[in-house]
Amino acid sequence: MTDTQGADGAHGGAVDGAPVIAILGNGGWGTALALVAHRNGARTRLWGIEGPYVAETRRLRENPRYLPGVALPDDLVLTADAAEAARDADLLVSVIPTQFLRPAFAAVGPALPRSVPLLSCSKGIERGTLRRPSEILAELAGERPLAVLSGPNHAEEVALGRPATAVVACLDGAVTGEIQKLFSDPGFRLYGSADVVGLEVAAAVKNVIAIAAGILDGLHLGDNAKAALITRGAVEISRLGVELGARAETFAGLAGIGDLIATCVSPHGRNRGVGERLGRGELLADILATMVQVAEGVETTRGVVELAAQNGVEMPICAVVHRILFEGLRPRDALHELMTRELKEESGS
């Protein structure tokens, strides 16, 4: 195939003289973003660190491990050579899981062209340093414009061209606008923002709340409980974000409540899936041993709880998720603790 043709008829193709976009990270989301860029006419290259697996995807024209069933166009470059991916790139896009950014950039960093803008699509808090992805990239990738992208997006749907929206944030409004143009099409609409901190805090903490949402599903506790969890989870996300310098309005938007809803209710959500299995009584080690993709929320939970403690922010849902994951607290006991806390006013609590 020379164009991408998904189940919903999304298609397109690169053209000569078009911008070059290098996507670093060939997981499901990286592949989906590569398809969006390709549909918009960019010359798109998708880099993965595992040479043999990249060769398999090139042979199959499909990403069977991370995005099965979605055809990859012939002129979408699939490579394990960082220099080939980044050569003459107009935009670099990092879609590497947060906990693997440092080792991955040890391999790819020297090949990156200087000063080219870098768009971070990673979600999480780095274990130990408590840094957000853009902070890690600022350290690793040299002086260059940095932007972040987040929103209620599941790769499986975006890859097929089903309608989705997201937010791109950068301190440089011109960079924000250029990224909006590169990725927006009739199936994928990008809004702009300057709140880098808000986008990254929302993206990280919503995965912790999604684990809690999955636990409710595993316990078969119904819609009322899920709605309450999402709502109170949004409060916790906003508390931490504002304390760290984010704008409160960000958490009422697509990157905040929008992404939280999608992550907590969708069957695609890996973090929600981890929680569901915990609610059914499985052990965390057994769950992680059977997963192909990374559930960022597990490690992120450690960082979120540490950040909350350092900044004096009350986050009871995240705290009990931490105790379930790492301290042996039983899910039903955690629920009882949350439901029997001291009674308070809703506003400001």
Image (cartoon, rainbow, N blue to C red):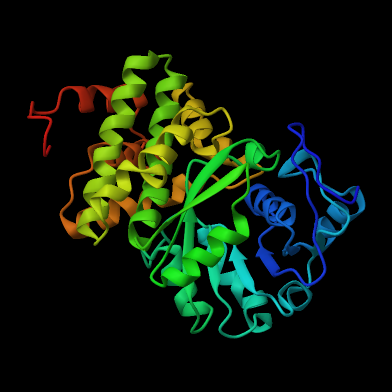
Judging depth in this view, the residue of 331 and 240 nearest the camera is 240
Q: Residue 84's quadrant in the figure?
A: bottom right
- Residue appearing at x 47%, y 65% in the figure: 176
Q: Is residue 43 above or below residue 329?
A: below
The residue shown at (63%, 43%) is: 186
Residue 246 appears left or right of 190: left
Q: Residue drawn at (70%, 70%), measured in percent from left and top?
A: 19
Residue 283's x, y, as percent?
50, 32
Using the rendered image of the protein, determine whether residue 291 is visible from the camera's viewpoint: no
Residue 284, percent from left and from top: 50, 37
Q: Quadrant of residue 214?
A: top left
Q: Is residue 98 above or below residue 329?
A: below
Residue 336 x, y percent position in the rendering = 24, 22
The percent coordinates of residue 126 (x first, y second) are: 43, 62
> Does the rendering let one see residue 86?
yes
Residue at 46% across / 20% down in the picture? 218
Location of the C terminus by quadrant is: top left
Establish if 221 lies above or below 6: above
**In the shown orientation, is residue 77 left or right of residue 35?**
right
With 110 as the anchor, is 100 left or right in this view? left
Q: Nearer the viewer, residue 243 or 14?
A: 14
Give the mark count: 0
In this rendering, position of residue 1 left or right of residue 123: right
